[in-house]
Image (cartoon, coloured by chain):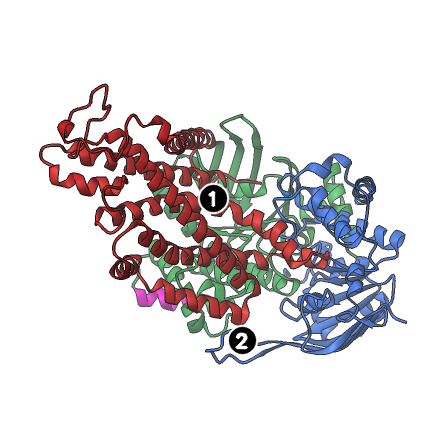
Amino acid sequence: MNVPLGRPRLLDRLSNQRLILIGCSVFLGLLFLAALAAPWLAPHDPYLVNLAVKLQDPSWTYPLGTDHLGRCTLSRLLYGARVSLGFAVLIFASSLLIGLLIGTLAGYIGGWVDQLLMRFCDGVMAFPSLILVLGLVGIFGPGLKQVIIALMLVQWVYYARMFRGLVMTLKEKNFIAAARVNGSSHWKIFRMHLLPNILPPLLVIGTLEMGWAIMDISAMSFLGLGVQSPGAEWGAMIHEGKSYIRTNPELMIYPGVMIMLVIASFNLLGESLSERFGMNK
Amino acid sequence: MKPVLSVEHLTIETIADGQPLVQNISFQLAAGQITGLVGESGCGKTVTSLALLRLLDEKVIRQSGRILLDATDLMTLSDRTLRRVRGGQIAFIMQNPMSAFTPVFTIGHQLMETIRTHDQCSKREAKERAIEALLEVNLEQPDRILKAYPFELSGGMLQRVMIALAVCLRPHVLIADEPTTALDVYNQKLVLYYLEKVRATYDTAILLISHDLSVIAEMADHVLVMREGEIVEQADVFDLFDRPQHPYTRRLLEQHGLQAGGMNA
Amino acid sequence: MSLLQIKHVSHRYGNQRFLSRQPEQTVLQDVSLTLEAGTCLGLLGRSGAGKSTLGRILLGLERPKEGQVLFEGQDIYQNLSSRQDIQVVFQDSFAAVNPKLTAGQIIAEPLTNFLRLTPDALEQRLITLLEQVGLIEADLTKYPHQFSGGQLQRICIARAIATNPKLIILDEAVSSLDMVNKAMILDLLRELKATLGLAYVFITHDVQAAQTLSDRFVILDHGQLVGDYPTLQSFTEATDGHVEAIRHAVLATHPRYRTIRK
């Protein structure tokens, strides 16, 4: 029986959480759709330079005004979303899969395989992603590709550790032993017993990590290491806009607010998911 | 015999839907006596024990009635005053000893902190008292135990540490909620032995909660049988076993009897 | 030929890390036992005596460092099909089932792994099994958290008997249940033993529970077999140190037999 000891009212928690869950999902969903549909939604070509209309205020033609090269800010935001969100998803998905594979192997098999894989992880973790990016930039010059590769090489370690921990905890539970006694193969155990029980934490971590991935890409671009002009990307837009901070702060504010909203949404989504899955006990 | 703790018309219900968890129960605990509280899981035993210490969340649960400790009604006390009562005058031993201790502090730290919260004394004095208490429950090498972390000790040992803590604070009342359920048979008897020792030495009134009638048979003077939030029968332990009045009591005894046989019948 | 023969089984736990020097712990030492079909062996001893480890070895979950386990005359590590005939019921039913599966899926797992049944035959078998353990068809679609401890243990028992095994390892199967449920589950186990001709290895520290189900008793202490009592009577009448210790540990069933309070 559940004895209620000093917790807030069940009803309040439930309704707040659902609201947030739905709200964030809708916002992010719409944003993803907008990013996908950018070629049709954007009123102008984001790369079209037209110095005659530079630094204009919002108008019917240019809903959010123009930047210092006369390019439509709204169009650049939309195309920027494709880069930020698209590549964030790419980084997230690939590091997740690699981390899942390595972490599960290490956790399930244990022994020297585990030790070997974990020492390898330790080695990779020792590299701060920034240094790695600088290294790659040093070799290949700055560019989005370098940032993506560097982040992919480093992000998976975090997932590997997490999955390893989860699998090791689950492995000790008797229902895994029961599954073996019942004749299930290791693959079946992974598919039917481990994966469904790892999925909830995975979703929660995933949403939080997406926020980080977007942050990383924007940060690198802002530093001038990632997306180079004329590329449209939120971090790069802030980078370009910083020269006009006195006269046209909106050049920095629009992309900045977008980054903030997206990351905040992912975070809130992650938190409400974790509450829903009962991970906050 | 004047009761040490007197519970009068205690009723506990959930605020949200008015569902009664405990309905209008009344009983008394006398000094130096062990009162057994027996019933199936879910009957309200644990809720009752927590209610006596007012540990239930009062935003979710409505608790009414009187809980008289000597002459003071615990229901009227402020949280600050209650904190002095909990531990100092009413001690609590719970079912899962591992969860009663914080895993990141040593046993010694936790024992001494509790002692010093209730009695003003120096660290050295607290340590001496802790060691003395551990020796009273026959835990060898008390120095080592004080330095150990909870996970390094077995369940049986941890229960004895809890009893040692109770010994330190010399409470008037001790509530033991299923203290032996998580232990194997060898440790069970040991823990009960030390509970008895506390009773005999300090004349403590003990409320012993268990679903196991053997524990009740071994220890209790007076028994309360609880079912779905109500006390269906109260009797002296011998009367209860020999002449049960309520059909539920008879059913419990029957199942208990089916279990026995061979060793001790 | 005995159903189960445990021959000179010894087992140790060594250290996993290659950088630490931890001495190996002996968990089982030269344990030999036989068990006949249809009988129940009560395996008693303190926590940590090695009982559960022996259970895991019998289930093929761990390979003993020394010795052999023969089922129907064949080594269980050579004849893997014997796994179908040796099943288990664990102590904590909630930890023994996948919380994401329905009762039906849980019980069906051994059936789909070991037998080739058509979907209809599978459904029928599931219903029959549920009825055998005292549950109803509607329970098939429920999830573990919707059941009580006692009910969930019945589902675990249904899973254990699903493929008509010959031997079931009961690893403290009733130790987490309250008095009422304990009695009911022991009744169920006794009934199934009679109707299905099952053999049990009943691992427990609860002597009274062991006595209601077992035909034979052995005591394990620090990994060694220290007592073997072929009948209930020889067990209750024994006077050696280990049985005395058990007798001392058992609590009174009636206040007149109490030993702690004078």
In the displayed structure, A92 sits above or below C206; it is above
Label 2: chain? C
The one nearer the camera, C148 or B121, is: C148
Q: Residue at x 21, y 49 (%)?
A: A224
Picture disc at residue C15:
2
> Are marks 2 and 1 in one subunit?
no
On the image, numbered disc 1 is attached to which residue? Answer: A203
Colour used to depict chain B in the structure image: green
Q: Amino acid at mark 1?
A: Leu
Tag 2, which secondary structure?
A: loop
Tag 1, which secondary structure?
A: helix
Image location of residue A9, percent across then percent down: 44, 32
Q: Amino acid at mark 2?
A: Asn
Label 1: chain? A
Number of numbered labels in the structure image: 2
Left or right: residue B149 compared with residue A212: right
Colour used to depict chain C in the structure image: blue
